[in-house]
Amino acid sequence: MSLGEIRNNFQELNSKIHKIMAEDFNIAEITDETSLAEYITNYDYTNEEYVNLLQKNNLSNSLITKKQALELFSISKIADYLELFSISSQLRDLFFDSIEITSTIHITNICSVVPKCKYCGYAAGTSTEGYVKPFRTSDEMIQNSAKAIQSSGLKRVSCSSGHGYDGLEVLRALKNVKKVSNLKVLVNAGADLTENCIIHLKNNNVDTICCNLESINENVFNSVKPGEKLQDRIEVCENILKHEVELSSGLLIGIGESYEDRVNHLNFLKDLNVQEIPIMGFNPYKNTPMEHHPKCSALEQAKTIAITRLMFPNIRITSPTPTIGAELMQYALMAGASNVATVIPDNHPMNIVGVGSPKTGNLNNVCKMIEELGLKPDIICK
């Protein structure tokens, strides 16, 4: 399939959406994205109602097949990249009217996985660029961080911990954040989540649970994560969905996987029915076993984001600032990302070090980069 054919598929989808919306609003014509957005606002249409209408009419399906996705990974010309990003970003804009921003609270870096993941600079003692020393964030600091994040205008936060707690550390974080704020909360404890803890997380109004598979090529997974089993993570994902909680599960790219591995992974996630996919490019942390492994470029991450968007038109696709590089975030946005993660406001009381690399995105800088592309950050203005 050529990019021209994909463009035609997008234009057909675009026309169908405008027709469906015009019928739903009982008006003669909606001609373009501007008038569509105006009508959605004027009729007090929520994004959820809009997406549900599109899903009901089968307008949120993949624009490409598995074979076509693999073909797109082989593009190498500037013109092809520009056209791919043009289609994927316009597709994102059909389903999202703003760019979500997610901040971070790290709960503990004390991790029981042995041997450690070869790329990890987050766990205690793994890298001089990371936290190095073990820590456990107090309830008071979690609450202070949540209040600071909310006062900055942000609406969502990620709370993550190391392994060894059966999920109880992120449950503690969730309770503290919800106690003092209205923030949406994603928790991430990897495979360290019992089914019972998932139930407790749901009962305490968790919004999203993240369990990244990182690679579904078992040889690659075992090579970089010798202390874990891929099946354990898959089972956690299945339990999250079993209890009807929004699932986030992403790819770590540039760790030795093939393009076919990435496409297989994305199709696996489609079968799982995930609601969020983080695309995380590998960045080497000093002093780790993968210190000298090549970094995954921002362009490679953007290409993967764009192809993911064509396969998943209406879900949250996330680019964390530490993995793409805070200064290169616009690559992800041009490719169709709808969420920027690990974004730290100036008033955050913790010194946050990124999981994928030490450097994180500053809220003011991220908002500026979003606006420079003519996009709107989803933030409550003070």
Image (cartoon, rainbow, N blue to C red):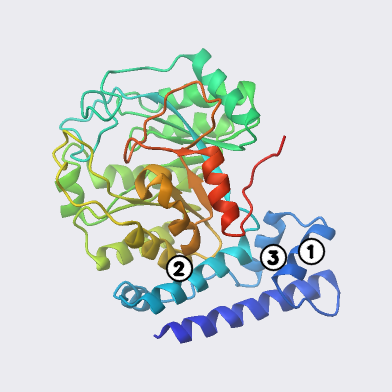
Crowd band around label 1 with a 10 angstrom C-alpha radius: few (<14), some (14–19), many (20+): few
Picture disc at residue 38:
1
Q: Earlier in the sequence, mark 1 or mark 3?
A: 1
Asked whether disc 1 touches disc 2, contact meaning CB atoms under 8 Å apart, the reply is: no
CA–CA distance between discs 2 and 3? 19 Å
Image x and y of residue 204, in percent: 57, 28
Three-letter amino acid code at the position of disc 2: Met
Read off the residue under disc 2: 311
Q: Quadrant of the N terminus?
A: bottom left
- The foreground one among 264 and 344 is 344
Mark nearer the N terminus (2 vs 3): 3
Q: Residue at x 16, y 43 (%)?
A: 290
Above or below residue 264? Residue 236 is: above
Give the secondary structure at mark 2.
Answer: helix
Classify 192 as above or below 52. Answer: above
Label 1 to label 3, Cα distance in Å? 17 Å
Question: Which callout, 1 or 2, points to the residue nearer the camera?
Answer: 1
Whether residue 273 can be seen here:
no
Quick one: 182 or 339, which is closer to the camera? Answer: 339
Query: Total marks drawn?
Result: 3
Dot placed on the residue nearer the N-terminal end, 1 or 2: 1
Q: Which residue is mark 3?
A: 53
Residue 306 in the image: state x and y as whole percent.
Answer: 43, 66
Q: Secondary structure at mark 3?
A: helix
Q: Secondary structure at mark 1?
A: helix
Q: CA distance from mark 1 to mark 2?
A: 27 Å
- The residue drawn where x is 37% and y is 75% is 78
Look at label 3 and name its amino acid. Leu
- Left or right of 12? Residue 362 is left
